Amino acid sequence: MQDKINGFLDLVRERNGNEPEFMQAVEEVAETVIPYIVNKDIYHGKNILLRMVEPERVISFRVCWVDDQGEIQVNRGYRVQMNSAIGPYKGGLRFHPTVDLSILKFLAFEQVFKNSLTTLPMGGGKGGSDFDPKGKSDNEIMRCCHSFMSELFRHIGPNTDVPAGDIGVGGREIGYLFGKYKKLSNEFTGVLTGKGVSWGGSLIRPEATGYGTVYFAQNMLATKGDDLTNKTVVISGSGNVAQFAAEKSIQLGAKVLTMSDSSGYIYDSEGIDDEKLKHIMNLKNVQRKRISEYCIKYPNSEFVKGKTPWATKCDIALPCATQNELDLNDAKVLLKNGCICVSEGANMPSTKDAVHEFQKAKILFAPGKASNAGGVATSGLEMTQNSLRYNWSREEVDKKLKDIMMDIHDSCIEYGSDDNGYVDYVKGANIAGFVKVADAMLAQGIV
Ligand code: NDP
């Protein structure tokens, strides 16, 4: 079996060897899906996984904009349209200086499986720019978003490709992107998700990824007859996903000890409660300041500069910042400190070795493509509401989100349980996500 996996990975590496994040995502899928395919006649001779790792289309373009000093800036924009077998391409846009094809292809590849898991009809894509929004004025952000959309608009549409936000692209950026799309296309359509509620957005969309990550943890804990009450939770990041993962953890009775950004983490032994979290949301979303400023208002807390929060003793870890932010050593420390559950809010935040360490210890571990799928699922609900020209209430959307997270959890159990009752959520998510897309591709022939 290992020969078959290695042979496949060698082939993929020949073409993509200079894309480490993409190869990491493909390796994880190959290790779980190839042993499953081998025993299934319908996949024999179809090269289905090889077709799935090749994007249907990759678009790369120039993004020129003028900064507040009148200087012309040049960035690079991308859209990776990975797979449309089960629906229009769907996936976020990331604005971050590290954005390149490897990062976007890994994200788009993960997105294909994630979107399939949600049970909604969405293909997978991802895009973004190496533009760095940090420290930019509102006008600079607007000019960059408008420039980005002046090329992207011809490649997307409500039945073709529906982008959303990701790192560095929140409600403000979606507004500027949507405004430019509407102007260029002369159409008010659901071409982006994460829109403001008064102009086509869905209630609960901003909350959905973080809430869903915690709902998934809740589902995993329930398999052990446990829940979040009085559990200590360590969270990384302080952006969209982290904020709402913290909010839901607090609502469910847990004590949130940390949050972070790329400069370090804050530790509050008394717990980050609702009021403190509101302060963080104001700091990050309105004032656009650093997480370290938390300690000015709450002097009993501490800021640990330049470090990730994984050495903090906790029951539950929710990595919600970025890829590969939790490595083997971090995993060992978390396990030594008694961590029983890891639910990934970010995409691929744990390195491959860290994942294997969690699995070896048989703790509850959910990969992002399952546990953070609540965001794109609610984007799917936003698309449905746009098509219906109707808005569901907060309660209705939250109920649908909870049900979807439960369904994803059930799919992981169906495909990931071993004979001793241990659930490999990575295997479960990969196979469940694969089956639906692969079957649609087989039905549609070689295209
Ligand atoms: P935001 O931009 O709102 O927040 C990102 C957070 O992560 C910030 O606190 C940021 O700190 C921190 N961060 C980013 N890069 C690094 C880094 N290299 N090292 C340490 N910290 C870093 O993004 P989101 O919350 O939307 O996204 C977070 C993760 O969740 C990403 O992996 C994204 O792909 C994933 N995700 C997001 C979804 C969504 O709906 N938004 C859906 C599914 C997954 P700083 O401000 O210092 O950069």
Image: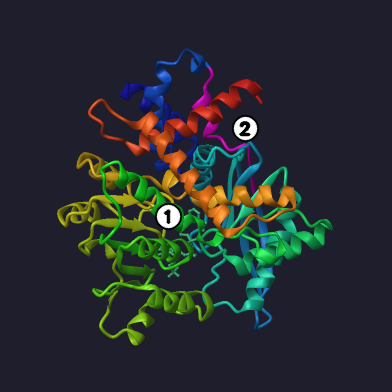
Residue 152 image point, x, y percent: 70, 54
Residue at 75% from the left image edge and 53% from the top image edge: 389
- Going by the numbered disc 1, the residue's amino acid type is Ala
Residue at 52% from the left image edge and 41% from the top image edge: 118
Whole-angstrom CA distance, mark 2 to mark 1, is 25 Å
Residue 180 visible (yes or no): yes
The residue lying toward the viewer, choosing from 144 and 161, is 161
Query: Would the CB of label 1 be found within 8 Å of ligand 1?
Result: yes
Q: Which residue is identified by label 2?
A: 85
On residue 346, the disc is: 1
Vertical position of residue 343 compared to residue 3: above or below: below
- Going by the numbered disc 2, the residue's amino acid type is Ala
Colour logic: rainbow
Vertical position of residue 159 compared to residue 197: above or below: above
Magenta run includes residue 351: no
Q: Return the residue found at the far left.
A: 336
Vertical position of residue 83 compared to residue 180: above or below: above
Query: Would the CB of label 2 be found within 8 Å of ligand 1?
Result: no
Residue 148 is drawn in which quadrant? Answer: bottom right
Q: Secondary structure at mark 1?
A: loop
- 412 sits left or right of 144 in the view: left
Residue 361 is drawn in which quadrant? Answer: top left
Of marks 2 and 1, which one's residue comes earlier in the chain?
2
- Magenta extent: 46-59
